[in-house]
């Protein structure tokens, strides 16, 4: 189920300056690590959220969204769908702008919670893929 249109997707991606990566991992083989690394390299402020991490890429990690202490533009979620309603509640409480559920992460209850709290919701899309596509950026000299 799509909860956004192309215009909304483009607005969210192009206007984002801060991203909380919920479920961030220090394992370079994990998608959350790859996406966070890419976004950080593109100049976005990244807030890794994982109570098991102290830092990621030299950035302090946070145990929860509430610990960040400032609103973020996007809460990018790399968690099981069953964990996302709680993340949505935290994103609303933290004053986030968008709840972004990564590829394969779909939960209508989380979407309803976020939407009721005034957040834009994007599900089952990869933020790094959309960022590359919409901003035509490259990760190196050969794209």
Image: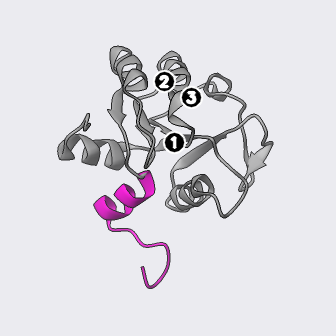
Region rendered in magenta = 127-143
Q: Residue drawn 56% across and 46% down?
A: 45
> Tag 3 or tag 1, which sits nearer the N-term?
1
Marks 2/1: CA–CA distance: 14 Å
The mark closer to the camera, 1 or 3, is 3
Q: Position of residue 100 (x, y in %)?
A: 42, 38
Q: Residue drawn 20% across and 47% down?
A: 6
Residue found at the very far bottom of the displayed protein? 142
Which quarter of the figure is the C terminus placed in? bottom left
Q: Residue drawn 78% across and 42% down?
A: 53
> Tag 3 or tag 2, which sits nearer the N-term?
3
- Residue 129 shown left or right of residue 18 in the figure: left
Q: Position of residue 131 (x, y in %)?
A: 38, 57
Q: Local crowd at mark 1 within 10 Å, few (<14), some, or many (≥20)?
A: many
Mark identifier at residue 19: 1
Q: Local crowd at mark 2 within 10 Å, few (<14), some, or many (≥20)?
A: many
Asked if the residues shown at circle 2 and circle 1 are in contact, with their CB atoms under 8 angstroms apart, the answer is no
Asked if the residues shown at circle 2 and circle 3 are in contact, with their CB atoms under 8 angstroms apart, the answer is no
Mark identifier at residue 74: none
Q: In the picture shown, does residue 132 fall above or below 125? A: below
Q: Position of residue 16 (x, y in %)?
A: 40, 43
Please name the residue that numbered disc 3 is placed on. 83
- Residue 43 shown left or right of residue 119 in the figure: right
- 3 or 62: nearer the viewer: 3
Q: Position of residue 128 (x, y in %)?
A: 44, 57
Mark identifier at residue 88: 2
In reply to whether residue 139 is colored magenta, the answer given is yes
Asked if the residues shown at circle 1 and circle 3 are in contact, with their CB atoms under 8 angstroms apart, the answer is no
């Amino acid at each position: 189920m799509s909860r956004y249109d192309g215009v909304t997707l483009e607005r969210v991606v192009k206007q984002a300056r801060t991203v909380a990566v919920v479920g961030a991992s220090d394992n370079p083989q994990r998608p959350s690590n790859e996406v966070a690394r890419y976004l950080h390299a593109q100049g976005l402020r990244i807030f890794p959220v994982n109570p098991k991490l102290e830092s990621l890429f030299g950035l302090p990690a946070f145990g929860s969204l509430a610990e960040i202490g400032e609103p973020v533009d996007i809460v990018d979620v790399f968690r099981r769908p069953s964990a996302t309603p709680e993340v949505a509640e935290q994103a609303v409480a933290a004053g986030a702008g968008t709840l972004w559920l990564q590829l394969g992460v779909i939960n209508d209850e989380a979407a309803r919670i976020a939407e009721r709290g005034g957040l834009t919701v994007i599900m089952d899309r990869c933020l790094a893929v959309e960022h590359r596509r919409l901003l035509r950026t490259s990760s190196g000299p050969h794209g």
